[in-house]
Image: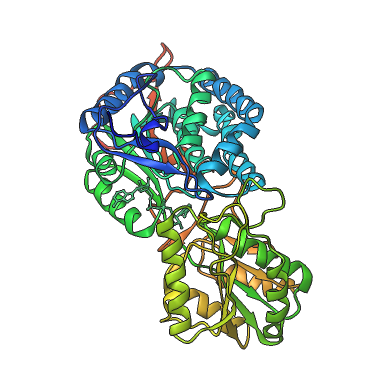
Amino acid sequence: MNAPTPVAALAPTVKLLIGGKFVESKTKEWRDVVNPATQEVLARVPFATQDEIEAAIASGKEAFKTWKKTAIGTRARIFLKYQQLIRENMAELAALLTAEQGKTLPDAEGDVFRGLEVVEHAASIGNLQLGELANNVAGGVDTYTLLQPLGVCAGITPFNFPAMIPLWMFPMAIATGNTFVLKPSEQDPMVTMRLVELALEAGIPPGVLNVVHGGEMAVNALCDHPDIKAVSFVGSTKVGTHVYNRATLAGKRAQCMMGAKNHAIILPDANKDQTLNALAGAAFGAAGQRCMALSVVVLVGEAQKWIPELVEKTKTLKVNAGTEAGTDVGPLISCAALSRVEGLIERGIAEGAKLELDGRKPTVAGFEKGNFVGPTIFSGVKPGMAIYDQEVFGPVLAIVAADDLDQAIEFINANPNGNGTAIFTQSGAAARKFQEDIDVGQVGINLPIPVPVPLFSFTGSRASKLGDLGPYGKQVVMFYTQTKTVTARWFDDSTTSHGVNTTISLK
Ligand code: NAD
């Protein structure tokens, strides 16, 4: 008799997308996609072979020959259709996302929606990709620019926004005339693949969008391959720094959005109720697994007395599976993430921070195997403690104290990260001073998670970002195109002849 087939072997396999076809990988290396609330194996994801990665890039290179010549209006209309398809499938996409990632269903819809906004933006590519023209820069001479696509571009995405971040990347790359190879997170690739299916349904031609799965080997192959012209990465600082160095050394453009430690300053004149609501939502939403999560609160002066109320408000948050109505805080992505976060909480206690609220090992009826840790709050946190120095990426809030606004700004500017920050105050003068003096790329004023809409670009800074140009908005049009400058003169019979000109000047 045969040995019983393990459950994982029965789970469906996630496919590669090469040349417009969803294909089964021939690899021998597979990893389970696991529901973080139940440990159920939902699917198996392949780590693509070198040949498969090569085939995906070759397919993008071939498709580029025709895609780059496809009219801009035709490209735009595909994204008009695509945004409609995403809207029509929103509930299914959110359910898939919650099953494999863990976040609550409403937050999963938010994840899809923030990506959908970029798709809508891609539909206006006709306006975004306009060049410049200067008329008559010398006698009968005009100069104008063409924003031309680069070729095959690659995207590497993290687990925490498996809808939004792939949608930051391939729609704008493809709308600007490039072809694309996407490498989603191996931890939750299923909703990404459903979005990719919808993109093909919207009319993206074979080979224009390709998908490979895997880890380090796949990422290195994309960074090294001479036919990949640009690499977009979102993920941890360690991996992003590696990707940036490797891709730029190979002569490519690279943009890497990386880890964070986002601080909020609370001045005593802030609206207390609104502020405490905002802090609890931004620190513990998505179980703290957002690159823009608020993980440090700097309480200034009298605002230090607000800790008990923040703790009481936080205690009302409900920890449960993301599928359950009324859940505020879902599970962490993996068992490994759970033990890492629990370990950091233990270190926080050992290193002398005051544990104001302990979220470890919550009881979650019906989901006893889930990777849950409840909201946790430390006060008296200082640089040098692991819970301050590291990105916890879990529902753990560190509180520090400052005497005044100047001291609070200095404290934040001394932290190496620069993804996001916020101030809560009723003083316009204080808010303006903060926006001018803070050395962080995205600033919120009475708004805890200041992720810009796609009319603007995502502008994290310092250790949170490598590369000048950010995702979406105007910056990404520059990232995914090269500017060609044309200087032109047309002669007719009335054009005066100046004879041979051996100087550099235009006459
Ligand atoms: P990660 O760096 O572990 O993984 C990101 C991608 O890199 C994945 O596709 C993964 O397969 C790949 N990868 C992992 N290890 C690799 C290696 N050794 N070599 C090459 N590739 C490798 O990040 P994650 O845990 O999936 O995501 C969480 C991190 O992403 C957090 O640090 C978070 O702050 C950051 N993040 C940043 C932003 C931003 O915009 N700044 C947005 C979302 C997430």
- Percent across and percent down for residue 389 are 42, 74
Residue 396 placement (x, y as % from top left): 54, 69
Q: Nearer the viewer, residue 259 or 21?
A: 21
Position above or below: 137 against 427: above
Quarter of the image for residue 498 reads top left
* Left or right: 441 as drawn, with respect to 81: left
Q: Position of residue 488 (x, y in %)?
A: 39, 25
- Residue furthest toward the top? 493
Instruction: Check the image and tell me how it is coloured.
Output: rainbow
The residue lying furthest to the front in this view is: 1
**Residue 147 horizontal side relative to residue 52, left or right:** right
226 versus 18 height, above or below: below
Front in this rendered view, residue 452 or 33:
33
Above or below for 147 versus 258? above
Question: Would residue 224 appear left or right of 442 to someone viewing this image?
Answer: left
Residue 485 appears in the figure? no
Residue at horizontal 58 percent and vertical 25 percent from the top: 82
Residue 285's image quarter?
bottom right
Q: Is residue 384 visible?
A: yes
At 33% from the left and 34% from the top, the residue drawn is: 4
Query: Residue at coordinates 49% horizontally, 67% vertically from top-left?
Result: 261
Instruction: Tell whether 427 sits left or right of 423.
Output: right
Residue 206 placement (x, y as % from top left): 40, 17
> Residue 478 falls in which quadrant of the image?
top left
Is 160 placed above or below 77 here? below
Q: Nearer the viewer, residue 15 or 153?
A: 15
- Which residue is painted at 68% across and 69% down in the image? 314
What is the quadrant of the C terminus in the image? top left
The N terminus lies in quadrant: top left
